[in-house]
Amino acid sequence: MPLDGLTLHAAAHELNTLLAGGKIDKITQAEDDEILLSIRSNQKNYKLLMSANSANPRIYLVKEYKKENPLKAPMFLMILRKHIGGGRILSISQNGFDRSLTLRIEAYDEMRVLRQKLLIIEIMGKHSNIILVDSESGKVTDAVKRVPLSMSSVREVLPNREFIQPPGQNKKNPLIGIGLEEFISVLKSKNSSILKAIYGNFEGLSPVIAREICFRASIDDSLSTYELTDLNYERLKNSFDRLFHDVSVNNIYPNIIMDKRLHTPVEFSAVALTHMEGFNVKHAESISEICEQYFALKDLYERIHQRSSGLRKSIQIKLDRVRTKLEKQTDELNRAHELDRYSKTGELLTANIYMLSKGMKEVRVIDYFDENAPEITIPLDEHLTPSENIQACYKKYNKSKSRIKELGIQIEQTRSEMEYLDNVMVSINNCTSLDSIEEIKEELAREGYYSFSKTEGKKGRKEKSSEPLEFTATDGTEILVGKNNTQNDRLTLKMSKPDDVWLHTKNIPGSHVIIRQNLDDVSEEALYEAAKLAAYYSKARTSSQVPVDYAPRKNVKKPNGAKPGMVIYDDYGTVYVTPDEELVYRLMKNR
């Protein structure tokens, strides 16, 4: 979610505590809508990121910032350097409880006169902006996004125009206490769900915070405002007051809510989101640290999705083509098998050659291959002699035998290719890092399924492979899971020992799994947990009772010429398990 008023309130307090009195040493603008202030405060260096990005507007301190600056400085950056470069930050405050912060900055102008400037960041989705305002005149010096009347008839944001606050929404500031009667009156102003009534009538609240207030009060947030009893409203008011009392005294709990299955960020907040059960919670002391982690992870997974979506689409197209090819080959094989009848036809004609003569179009003979010995009609080529008609039948039969053999080999190759591409799709869907995507591209390039663009070629690609996923079974046994086909080969054939236990879903594309223990010594619990990992990191992730084969690793062989990840095995056992997301997360090492 974007920064809401509550999180901004906590951020404003943190930033003001750390940066008030600090000197702006450097200003950069790596993106069109993103500013970075390097600040020296209390003998420490800080980097304050301000972004008016429509999708992810934000402001917080960053520890790492690796974006390169453009060769030519943007106009807004030049103006900022002129007006606030070398200036001191007097204060950082929130405007009411809305999604807007103001940095009050004191800096010398070109006449060496100290003047105050306001650097305002408005976090409002597509209307987000960073605006520099002259404190004395109240006029806009410039903005990262200029907004003429042609773009907005409500509010103009242009140099030398009076700065106007965003249009008010007649919402209440939740930090200003109100009585129970007024609280009920505000929420009952419209007939809507209590969830919508809370975030729709109080400034800076997101649906997530409104849902948390309801949850803490044990009230169904889908209920209508007219359905709640006086007791419901009293509980709701108590929950509301307690939460915002903690916020007002800066008793906060910066945290990120993580999806356990995808390991991706779902939400973040300055208060504990107790209603989001079943998720992993990452806590930090600093709201900036939480924001940096959240947006860094969000940016990472967005980039993983962007980089993998094209690859996924390309592999899917290839898979569809291979399936079509297999269907055609199977149809042709069926037709070739039908030609087997020409062997029987040739023998029947040979047995009845005395009945044949050139110019005949057909002949009726007894089919002695059928126990009922029916009389059948065999078509003939009138231009051929009896012997030539017989030879034509055997020729068709021999041709069908050769084609059946060829098609058998081709179908096996096509099925192998389809299995390989299916495994690639599973690997792509399991990717959690950019390096994993690059490894898959490398593998596909070696197999002739992918060509690096000139841009990708210039970057250079890493030779070192990433490590397999590491898990620890409940009894302490080490379990490793391959992330892609190349890694599956390395894990099974090079990293594991002959007596280690190898697992893989039966006839289902998926990862290779290795238990670092002899099969005779592996506990039943560890074996089943490893099998569940194998099922989870396979195409059958959402299925139940998934068959998983297991065997000593020495029973696993790679045929000559087989594609990456493709192996054969014998003398194995099979267990049936249902993938378990909770278990995967619990067993994951260094999560």
Image: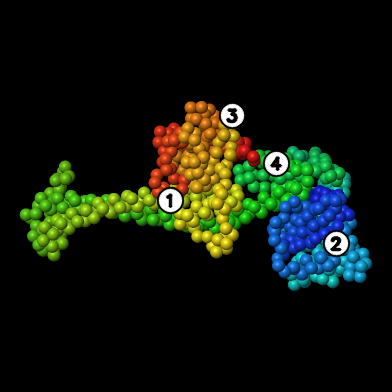
Q: Which residue is mark 4?
A: 281
Quadrant in the picture for residue 554? top left
At x 13%, y 51%, the residue is: 348
Label 2 crowd (10 A; few <14 / some 14-19 / many >=20) = some
Q: Secondary structure at mark 3?
A: loop
For the residues labelled 3 and 4, say whether their Cβ atoms are less than 8 Å apart. no
Q: Position of residue 184 (x, y in %)?
A: 82, 46
Q: Mark 1 to mark 3: distance in Å? A: 38 Å
Along the line of sight, which residue is nearer the eye, 122 or 419?
Answer: 419
Q: Amino acid at mark 4?
A: Val
Q: Which residue is mark 1?
A: 418
Marks 1 and 2, how far apart in space?
Answer: 63 Å
Q: Which residue is mark 3?
A: 475
First along the sequence among labels 1 and 3 = 1
Q: Earlier in the sequence, mark 3 or mark 2?
A: 2
Using the numbered discs, state the Cα–Cα distance from disc 4 to disc 1 in whole angstroms.
Answer: 40 Å
